[in-house]
Amino acid sequence: MTAADGPDVTHETAVGQGESAGEAAVETIHREMTVFARRARASAGRMHPELSLVSYTLLGHLEERGGCRATDLAAHYALDKSTVSRQVAVLERSGLIERRQDPEDHRVQVLHLTDAGRQILAQVTESRRAAFQERLTEWPQEDLERFAAYLTRYNAWTPTRNAG
Amino acid sequence: MTAADGPDVTHETAVGQGESAGEAAVETIHREMTVFARRARASAGRMHPELSLVSYTLLGHLEERGGCRATDLAAHYALDKSTVSRQVAVLERSGLIERRQDPEDHRVQVLHLTDAGRQILAQVTESRRAAFQERLTEWPQEDLERFAAYLTRYNAWTPTRNAG
DNA sequence: CGTTTGCAGTTGTACTATACAACCAGACCA
DNA sequence: TGGTCTGGTTGTATAGTACAACTGCAAACG
């Protein structure tokens, strides 16, 4: 299905031989990203038993946005609202976030980081960052910046209803 | 879009100010990789209900290596051997891989893709690759290659205790 | 008004991936 | 032969997730 959607792209050979250099690169990116994803969770759990990868991202988002609704989180991370609901419940129970009823719409609970949440988040961020730093410590500055830019760009992409 | 869309870095994370540009880049890489990881799984499941992200990577590894032991998979993906064992069992039950007793060491089961496995893998790879391609279609060739190289390099890194 | 429709969030249920620990079996060493 | 190491399986527990059914509030419609 997905594959058939973009007939104009040059993936005719696909898994066959005679791939262009571009396809090879895409293939590599695809594979490496996958490997990364596979590992991320596992290592995240070990590094910070206190804060799962999900919780971490959620908290991060909250900090970044200065509070938002559960639904926003769900939409943003492509999670089911029930999942978010439970995660949020956990985070609240742990005192990392708090809910504030939106006075204008009583259905809505705006989520905010608590001080404790901010603190934990900072800690975990720091240690994660340190781990990343360790990996990246020998990279030339230029490469770091380019890599960062590439990732950002990659993630920023949104499924255009039609690749224009 | 948005976990990614605070990309311009400068996102000093309460970890102290005065971050160097290098640290900022690391921070961005960290963040973007995390976002990616968070999403990868969710989308993977939806794209290919037939083949979980894990199974997919496992199959991919098998193809790449032309067969290997369960322990190798575990080591490579930082998974517990029990996890691999179960995954392997599933894949075998589905007829995607087969086990061959190593004649030289009866403890060892060398895992191989079956034809069916190769086929499914190719399918999923193709559709995943197409999705990636779609994202990357507008990237200049040079960037693609650099990005691929960065990712490879990133993933290739091993904790020094191991490598040294 | 009251009803319907819709959105935010929760809860019940089920499944998958995962880890850890206990275990089994074959191999290697002394 | 026995002790230990290694590859793999199984028991058990947990986290994260989805989906569906539900509650509660709100806005629109009559």
Image (tube, coloured by chain):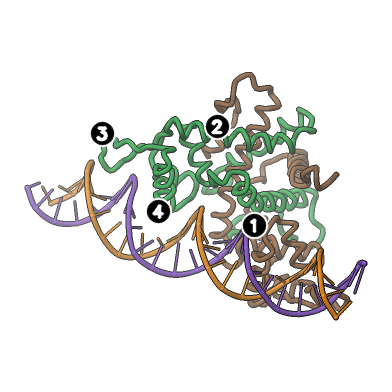
Chain colours: A green, B brown, C purple, D orange
Q: What residue would you read off at disc 3?
A: A103
Q: Which residue is mark 2?
A: A122
Task: Name the residue carrying label 4.
Answer: A82
Residue B62 appears left or right of A45:
right
Q: Residues within 10 Å of mark 2 (few under 14, many from 20)?
A: some
Q: Chain of mark 3?
A: A
Spatial distance from mark 2 to mark 1, Cα to Cα?
A: 34 Å
Give how far apart the Cα atoms at labels 1 and 4 are: 27 Å
Number of the label disc, if any, that sits on residue B128: 1
For the residue marked with disc 2, what is the amino acid?
A: Ala
Is B31 on the left-hand or right-hand side of C3?
A: right
In the image, residue A124 sits, relative to residue B76, either above or below, namely above
What's the residue at 31%, 41% (across, down)? A108
Name which residue lies at 61% across and 39% down.
B32
Instruction: Tell me which corner region of the image, top left, top right, bottom left or bottom right, holds residue B7.
Output: top right
Badge count: 4
